[in-house]
Amino acid sequence: MMSLAQVERHIAQVQRQLLALGPLHPGTISEQYNVCGNPSCRCKDPKRPQKHGPYHQLSFTWQGKSSTRFLRPEQVEPMQRKVANYKRLRELMNEWVSLGVELERAEREKEKRAGGD
């Protein structure tokens, strides 16, 4: 159990981390390998097919709407950072809410001690 001051310091630390996150984007990035329509292509070789790719695909749901889009090679790394920042945002928000619950508990405990003297 943390003291009231410890919880408040921890909340301030979480808030500073939130402010430092940078660009955000929800979703996951996956690699896709595709087969084309050319019957003489290497991807259609009956013995050793070699699919085209990898192609990077971003999939996400935002405000109830699912979206998927392919990323150009130069977009992959910046988008990976944005997706990682968004994941960290969610983790920090959950931590902040948990600390808020702990803060409320610590405040009630302090009031109980102050009233019981």
Image (cartoon, rainbow, N blue to C red):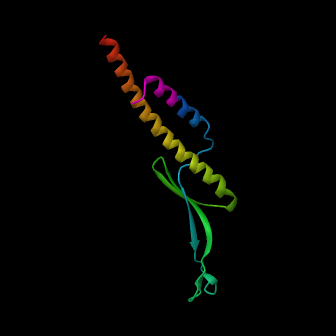
Residue that sits furthest to the left in the current view = 116
Q: Position of residue 47 (x, y in %)?
A: 57, 89
Instruction: Look at the image and tell me in which quarter the C terminus lies.
Output: top left
In the rendered view, tell whether residue 21 sits above or below residue 66: above
In the rendered view, tell whether residue 43 sits above or below residue 82: below
Q: Position of residue 42 (x, y in %)?
A: 63, 83
In the rendered view, does 99 fall on the left or right side of 71? left
Residue at 60%, 35% in the rendered image: 19
Quadrant of res 76:
bottom right
Instruction: Look at the image and tell me in which quarter the N terminus lies.
Output: top left
In the rendered view, tell whether residue 86 sits above or below residue 29: above
- 114 vs 96, nearest the viewer: 114
Give the residues drawn in magenta, as a range.
Answer: 1-11
In the rendered view, does 6 fall on the left or right side of 73? left
In the rendered view, does 98 fall on the left or right side of 25? left
Residue at 35%, 16% in the rendered image: 111
In magenta segment, residue 6:
yes
Magenta-drawn stretch, dominant element (helix, strand or loop): helix
In the rendered view, does 57 fall on the left or right side of 99? right
Q: Position of residue 71 (x, y in %)?
A: 63, 60
Numbered marks: total: 0
Residue at 58%, 86% in the rendered image: 48
- 2 vs 33, nearest the viewer: 2
Residue that sits furthest to the right in the current view = 74
Residue at 57%, 50% in the rendered image: 83
In magenta segment, residue 98:
no
Residue that sits furthest to the bottom in the current view = 47
